[in-house]
Image: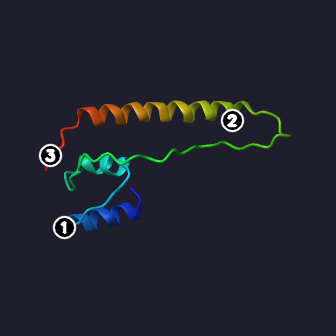
């Protein structure tokens, strides 16, 4: 967990406060039972991840493998988060 997220969580633990964080932060800190996540659906912006390469460079098998790995990893993460969202019981 990076220092900024840790600082936000430390503040939340010490005060009556509310913040909007990425789902990954709530997911990571949920096991600690230090903060409570509220089930509020906030529409997410579409984001893209790109691997840029030079057009005149020879195609590298390593880049193809890396691209496939990144795509499958994000697909797995998407399913894990969805499964967690469906299984979690929101409480105070």
Which one is in front, 46 or 49? Answer: 46
Task: Give the number of the mark in front: 1 or 2.
Answer: 1
Q: Badge 3: few (under 14), some or many (20 or more) residues near its Cα, within 10 Å?
A: few
Of label 1 and label 2, which has the lower sequence position? 1
**Image location of residue 3, percent across then percent down:** 40, 64
Which mark is nearer the camera, 3 or 2? 3
Residue on which the image places disc 1: 16
- Disc 2 marks which residue? 63
- Mark 3 → mark 1, Cα distance in angstroms: 17 Å
**Side of 35 where 45 appears, left or right:** right
**Whole-number angstrom distance, CA of label 1 to CA of label 2:** 47 Å
Instruction: Name the image colouring.
Output: rainbow
Above or below — where is 46 with respect to 65? Answer: below
Is 43 or 37 nearer to us in this picture? 43
Nearest to N terminus: mark 3 or mark 1: 1
Give the alpha-carbon distance from disc 3 to disc 2, as whole Å: 44 Å
Residue 92 at x, y percent in the picture: 13, 50
**Residue lying at 66% horizontally and 42% vertically, measured from the top left:** 51
Residue for point 41% across, 59% down? 2
Question: Residue visible at 32% across and 65% down?
Answer: 8
Q: Residue at x 20, y 56 (%)?
A: 34
Closer to the camera, 18 or 36?
18
Q: Secondary structure at mark 2?
A: helix
Q: Nearer the viewer, residue 44 or 72?
A: 44
User: Counting other residues with Cα less than 10 Å from the Cα at mark 2, is it few (<14), some (14-19), or many (20 or more)?
Assistant: few
Q: Is residue 87 left or right of residue 64?
A: left
**x, y percent for residue 56:** 86, 40
Residue pointed to by mark 3: 91
Q: Seen from this angle, which residue lies furthest right?
A: 56
Specify which label sits upstream in the sequence, 3 or 2. Answer: 2
């Amino acid at each position: 967990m990076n220092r900024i997220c840790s600082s936000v969580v430390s503040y939340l633990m010490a005060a009556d406060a509310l913040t909007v964080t990425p789902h990954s932060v709530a997911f990571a800190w949920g096991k600690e039972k230090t903060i409570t996540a509220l089930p509020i659906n906030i529409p997410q912006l579409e984001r893209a991840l790109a691997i840029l390469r030079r057009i005149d460079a020879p195609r590298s098998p390593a880049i193809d493998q890396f691209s496939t790995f990144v795509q499958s990893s994000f697909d797995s993460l998407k399913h894990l988060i969805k499964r967690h969202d469906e299984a979690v019981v929101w409480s105070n």
